[in-house]
Amino acid sequence: MPGSNALASSFRDPAGFLYCRDGCLYRQINTEYSTDYDLLNSSGLYATLVKAKLLIPHTEVGIEFAENSLAYKVIRPELIQTISYPYEWCFSQLKDAALTTIKIQRIALKFGMVLKDASAYNIQFHHGKPIFIDTLSFAKYREGEPWVAYMQFCQHFVAPLALMSFKDCRLAQLSLNHIDGVPLDLASKLLPLRSYLKYSLLVHLHLHAKAQQKYANSSDRYVTSVKPKRIEPRAYSAFLQGLHNTIKALHWKFPETEWGDYYSTTNYQDHSMRHKETLVEEFLSSVAMDRDASVVHDLGANDGHFSRIATRLGFSVVSQDIDPVAVEKNYLQTKSNQEENLLPLLLDLTNPSPAIGWSSAERMSFV
């Protein structure tokens, strides 16, 4: 059992858990995960993923930091400055998170391991890019076994991205109501008929949903008697490539919105804009003199124009807006410019992200 300092976000994982002590974040690795943890390191997978900035790095500390007697190792992961969740991301952020997850799974296979978890909550944005944060999500690959996290990947990524692409980007908020991912049968019902014409969505979403329902309605005896089909390495590789292509092919043609083109359609005259820029820069420069001030929250940031004044002064900025088009444009600019200290988020200040999950503690409230 996790100790009293354990974070509620990791209570489900028998392999270990996160906890805070004396202001530091630690992850206890339980003895039952020792074989997979050792393989993660000895295979070279950990070093490869960290070098590629795909997995959060950590430092091993002494066993005396453990929370209980089940500990095999204790690690101290590098801190993420701002934790965000899938329902706070724009379309391209969720898409990049999905592609990162698939990329990690494909690399893991080359080292004889797989991702046993493909939750969107295992991704955070760190220095401007998506990064995997759950060190305990890797397991030894057993040849012939299908990907155990396939359904989870489809619920956390394929379903919400397809709904955003084909219907309405606001349907991403379904992730707020479904912490385990958008149910595939629900996504299938909400998607238009033309989505059936895309073979990838037909397979990974619509037929996948029907298969789920079939087995859910079957007796336990029948389900346990069905053995998963063996999948050969070449077919496994092709399957992952297909999932990658499915995600890559999803696009969002964003509409005109009130705030999406605010600065290009605003009534600001050039001199008024320059005056506001000067005021913002002068204020932030005075704040920068306080060494304890390092993070700026830009509330109603639109496309992040003024957020970037703060980044130029050395601040890390959480750039928030209610408009999905504005956040999308902000993120695409952040990505294009390779900006490391700006995080665009989709947030409604009058209805901020609540605490959700078991006992309303698995995922934190924004406020």
Image (cartoon, rainbow, N blue to C red):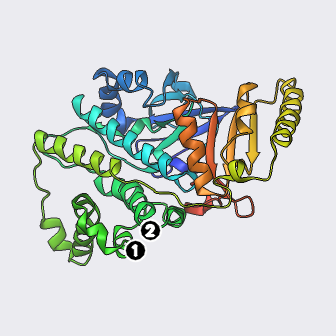
Residue 162, percent across and down? Answer: 38, 61
Q: Nearer the viewer, residue 181 or 264?
A: 264
Q: Which residue, given by chain and number where applicable, does mark 2 sit on?
A: 167
Tell whether 168 sits left or right of 275.
left
Q: Residue at image x 75%, y 32%?
A: 310
- Per the model, the C-alpha gap separating discs 1 and 2 is 8 Å
Tell whether 22 sits left or right of 96.
right
Q: Amino acid at mark 1?
A: Leu
Residue 165, percent across and down? Answer: 42, 60
Q: Which residue, given by chain and number where applicable, does mark 1 sit on?
A: 190
Q: Residue at image x 22%, y 30%?
A: 110
Q: Splitting the image into 4 quarters, where does residue 216 fall?
A: bottom left
Residue 84, percent across and down? Answer: 59, 47
Q: Crowdedness of circle 1 by 10 Å Cα count: few (<14), some, many (20+)? A: few
Figure label count:
2
Q: Crowdedness of circle 2 by 10 Å Cα count: few (<14), some, many (20+)? A: some
Q: Amino acid at mark 2?
A: Lys
Q: Earlier in the sequence, mark 1 or mark 2?
A: 2
Above or below, 170 against 326 in this view is below
Above or below, 344 against 26 in this view is below
Per the rendering, the mark at residue 163 is: none
Tell whether 43 sits left or right of 3.
left
Residue 351 seen in the figure: yes
Residue 366, percent across and down? Answer: 68, 52
Q: Nearer the viewer, residue 204 or 282?
A: 282
Q: Nearer the viewer, mark 1 or mark 2?
A: 2
User: Is the C-beta separation of discs 1 and 2 under 8 Å?
Assistant: yes
Q: Secondary structure at mark 2?
A: loop
